[in-house]
Amino acid sequence: MFNVAPVVAIWLAWFFVAANVVGTKFATPYAASTLFMLLSCTVAAVCFIPYLVKTGGWKTLLAKKVWPQCLLMATFGTALPMTFFMLALNYTTPANAAILNQFEMVYSLILAYFLLGEKPTGKQIGGSLLIVFGVGVLLWQTGISVQLKGDLLILGTLWMFQVSHIFAKKLPQDMPPALIAAARAIFAIPVLAVFCAVLFTVQGPLLFTPTWVLWVTLGFSAICNYFIGNTFWYTAIRNMDLGKATAIILSYPVMTFILSVLLGQDTVNTYKVLGLILALSGAYIVTGIIKGDKK
């Protein structure tokens, strides 16, 4: 759908992921996380309509053997984790959130061991310990505070991404990258709509204060992240070495940290820098990106 080189696609996806964390933080005072995500995915889905009509992608997405996998992928890859992620940003900083996301690698090893019987290597265990130490540094710096609530909420939802990957792998191998990205947005909508309806019934009208800040962040999240960014990510991993793509995307917390500090959402301190270094180093080792694994 977008005629760009894979290397360009991965770097753009890298930036959009990093910036989306910061942008979403700005939206938290103005919209409930579930409603914000519902609107973001809806706008992204609308952007995909011309592509789906032109290519007939609707038929693939609605196929009997495909749509259940798409629904589960979107539920655990977008609807649930991203809603909780935005909720957590009410309490913690974008930099913390991005660094803590590296803990997903630890969940990956744990699930692979229990579900697939894959025993981690010594380097993977060592890398996991580095991630744990990095996360521990951040939690230690946070202490018993409201920010800790946000940090723990993020850690408690990262396993969902790994579950989403399981269902994504079951999709037809010939599905175009844009179609997978479209599925992530489209099939998240009914799940988020149900969440919004339940919350409305339980607690009344959801927070939504239309301001220019909300409209800008909503537009960026929907168009740049869930429409363009996800498409670029799947384009990259389908057309370039997965190791290289993963190595690049893993470093996005650095850009999130920089943007967060520049925009006044975070401050630089020893704990954050040390946590960032440890978590990223561990993530690189766990995924086998270091050169030594290729010799």
Image (cartoon, grey):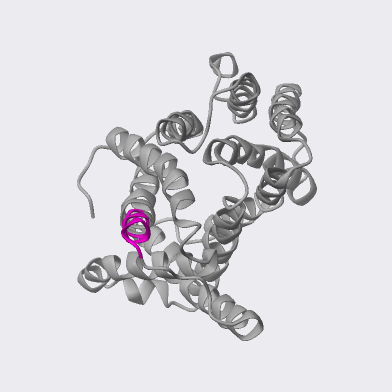
As rendered, which of 276 and 208 lies closer to the eye?
208
As rendered, which of 109 and 85 lies closer to the eye?
85
Q: Does 80 sit above or below residue 67?
A: above
The residue at the point 74 percent across, 26 percent down is: 133
**How far across and down, in percent of the image, does residue 127 sit?**
69, 25
The residue at the point 43 percent across, 43 percent down is: 17
Residue 286 vs residue 16: left or right? Answer: right
The residue at the point 31 percent across, 56 percent down is: 216
The residue at the point 36 percent across, 62 percent down is: 179
**In which quadrant of the rendered view does residue 271 lie?**
top right
Q: Is residue 212 magenta?
A: yes
Residue 270 vs residue 226: left or right? Answer: right
Question: Looking at the magenta stretch, what is its main secondary structure?
Answer: helix
Residue 1 vs residue 176: left or right? Answer: left
**In which quadrant of the rendered view does residue 96 lie?**
top right
**How far across and down, in percent of the image, does residue 57 sit?**
31, 70
**How far across and down, in percent of the image, does residue 15 sit?**
37, 38
Tag count: 0
What range of the chain is rendered magenta? 211-220
Q: Is residue 218 magenta?
A: yes
Which of the image's four quarters has the N terminus?
A: bottom left
**How far across and down, in percent of the image, does residue 203 sit?**
64, 80
